[in-house]
Image: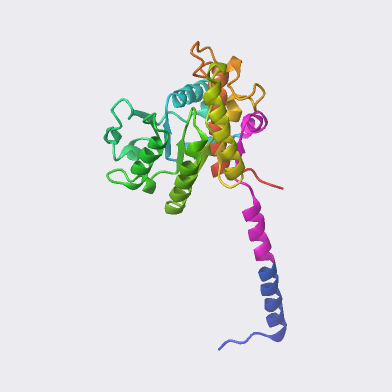
Amino acid sequence: MMFFPKSLTLCLLAAATLVHLIAPSALAVEEASPAPYVDSKAIKERFDQITAEDMELLRGKNILLASRSFGLNLLKGLTALAKQDSKYDLVSSYERYNVFKEGGNLGIIPADAFDKTKFVHFLATYYPHTKRLEEVNELLVEGPHGFGKSVDVVVVYFHTATPALFETYKTTLERWQAAYPNVKFIAVTSGFMGPKFAKENEASQAFGDMVREQLKGKVPVYDLGAILSDDFRVGNQFCPEYTADPAEVHPNLPAGEEMMAKGFLLILKETFNPPQTP
């Protein structure tokens, strides 16, 4: 048996005591750090902080995005940002699959999709809104895909939603996170349309409020509603300067699409590489 000098033993005991006292407080600080949250204000303040190294990190991640047509506006924004500055490219390894057009057939997505590309985007079944959660769940959990073993981050986009969706949405995210602790699941508030869709926008506002109240700070949140309304500067509708759509459905001007894309890159960056706190 090895014995230590008395002076060294006292030093070791003191060090062990110090570690015991410090460790819980350090853990508490880590647990107290809120999950990233991105709205319009965050984009204006922090998007320029994304570095080439951050983007290289993101290009190495396997991304699964489920959306309807607002995801196409996001794609146009991402493409525009990459043309303006190649540093922001996230779509050079991108594939899209129109599951909705194929009647909900997830089989059109190759089981080895992530062996061939980094960013898999599928256009989901539109209604009911829970259906796209079911489709993502099937891709994550069931064969032949089993994407839960290969994906790094999952985003489910809603251009509009109702508060009735929230509990299913919340519990589904929780179930996924428990089953796949190494995967990042980013919560998204639903978007807005033009003033013609006041009823739908009111429902989206209610859904988004529930996301902010119950998920903000706990999980990464991409606040699509706040981004499209410039943090509600124009109320619960998208900014008029973000659209030229006579139907008032899509934020189809570069200003809107690029804000969506900047927010997407920022929430990904801060999810995988959180800002350093003082």
Q: Dominant secondary structure of the magenta stretch?
A: helix
- Residue 232 x, y percent position in the rendering: 65, 26
The residue that appears at 69% across and 65% down in the rendered structure is: 22
- Specify start and end residues of the magenta stretch as a single range: 22-49
For residue 5: magenta?
A: no
So how many labels did they put on this image?
0
* Residue 207 visible somewhere in the drawing: yes
- Residue 205 x, y percent position in the rendering: 58, 30
Of 192 and 257, nearer the camera is: 192
Of 85 and 48, nearer the camera is: 48
- Residue 254 x, y percent position in the rendering: 54, 17
* Residue 54 visible somewhere in the drawing: no
Residue 267 figure quarter: top right
Residue 27 figure quarter: bottom right
Of the 4 image quadrants, the one containing the N terminus is: bottom right
The residue that appears at 53% across and 27% down in the rendered structure is: 191
For residue 23: magenta?
A: yes
Image height of 89 relative to 54, above or below:
above
- Residue 154 x, y percent position in the rendering: 45, 40
Q: Judge left or right: residue 107 versus residue 155.
A: left
Image height of 50 relative to 230, above or below:
below
Q: Judge left or right: residue 153 versus residue 217.
A: left
